[in-house]
Structures are given as structure tokens and as C-alpha cells.
Image (cartoon, helix red, strand yellow):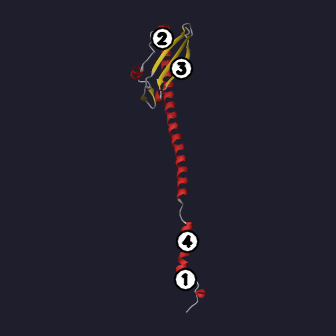
Amino acid sequence: MKSPLNRGFTPLENKSRQRTRLSSLTGFTLPELLLAASILAFALSGLLLLFVNNSLLNSANRNLGIAVDHAQYCLEEIREKEFSGLIDSINNGNWTWSTDDIRDKHISSLNGQYVALVNETITTVLLNATDPIDVRVTVAWDDRGGKNRSLTLRTLVAGKIK
């Protein structure tokens, strides 16, 4: 009979050591996975917030660009008008337009599309009735979320030199 001290390593003992080493070296523990998932969720929520704010800012800038375009259109129409009847035309509200008036005028902006802003109004006021006349054009509209926004352009229009 062989002595237990002379046996050496048996395949059973060898497999058991390999299993111990493999199980300690492979995979993540549940707390590690939960920590990694929470960090990832936190980072992605920050990116989502950034994307939403960027979208809102883009929309507000688009609307501002349209408002500038409409105010410039109105000022150009005023400049093309004969000076002698200009004061009466402004006082009669010829350049005070509602959203429907703006759509009917087909003011071109955004790649040739005819766009009116939400609840857009254009108001023209005469600040000074002497030559040169002082004209103020205000474009008001509702932005996303119901915010009231407005833009004012002001210019001087002089009578033509004869």
C-alpha cells in the first residue's frame, strides 16, 4: 500500500486549483456592474440635456433670424415708398401686419419658404415726422414655450434731394 505522503498531485486536486483561479479572475461582480451602469446613465443624461438645450437654442435663433428678415423686408418697403406720402402711410398702419398679412405678402426666408412665426405681428411707428423721419419697426412673436419675444429695428428715411 502506498503512503499518503508519496501520492503527489492527483488530477482531481489539479482541476480544483484551476477552477479556483479561473473563478477569481473572470467577470465582474454585481456591485462593479451597478457602479459602471450608474456612471454611464449619469453621463448619458448629461448628454441628453445638452442635446435638448441645443435644440431649443437652435429654434430660438432660427426664429430670431426670421424676425430680422421680416423687419428688414418692412423697412425696404418703406424706403421704396415715395417720401411725400410716407408719413401718412405709416400713420395709417400700412406697415402694421398680422400673421395672416405676413403670410399673404410671401416674405421669403429660409431657402425660399414663406414662413410666419407663431402669433407674429409687425408694428411700424413714426418717431419723428420731420425730414429725415425716424421709423421704428417692431416684430413680436411667441417662441417655444409661449415666451413673448420681440425685435426692433430703427432707421432714418430722408426725402430725396431734388
Q: Earlier in the sequence, mark 1 or mark 3?
A: 1
C-alpha gap between disc 4 and disc 1 = 16 Å
Q: Amino acid at mark 3?
A: Thr
C-alpha gap between disc 4 and disc 3 = 77 Å
Is mark 3 in CB contact (under 8 Å) with mark 2? no
Q: Which residue is mark 2?
A: 90
Question: How crowded is the residue under tag 2: few (<14 C-alpha within 10 Å), some, or many (20+)?
Answer: some
Q: Earlier in the sequence, mark 2 or mark 4?
A: 4
Q: Which residue is mark 3?
A: 152
- Tell which tag, 2 or 4, sits nearer the viewer: 4
Question: How crowded is the residue under tag 4: few (<14 C-alpha within 10 Å), some, or many (20+)?
Answer: few
Q: Amino acid at mark 1?
A: Thr
- Tell which tag, 2 or 1, sits nearer the viewer: 1
Question: How crowded is the residue under tag 3: few (<14 C-alpha within 10 Å), some, or many (20+)?
Answer: some
x, y (%) of residue 123?
48, 16
Would you say 101 lies left or right of 54 here?
left
Say if 77 sits above or below 20 in the image: above
Nearest the eye: 11 or 79: 11
Task: Please state, as top left, top right, bottom left or bottom right, where the N terminus lies in the image.
Answer: bottom right
Residue lying at the far bottom of the rendered structure: 1
x, y (%) of residue 47?
53, 43
C-alpha gap between disc 1 and disc 3 = 92 Å
Say if 109 sits above or below 14 in the image: above
Q: Which residue is mark 1?
A: 10
Element type where label 3 sits in the image: strand
Residue lying at the far right of the rendered structure: 5
C-alpha gap between disc 3 and disc 2 = 16 Å
Total numbered circles: 4
x, y (%) of residue 129?
54, 7
Q: Amino acid at mark 4?
A: Thr
Q: Residue at x 56, y 67 (%)?
A: 24
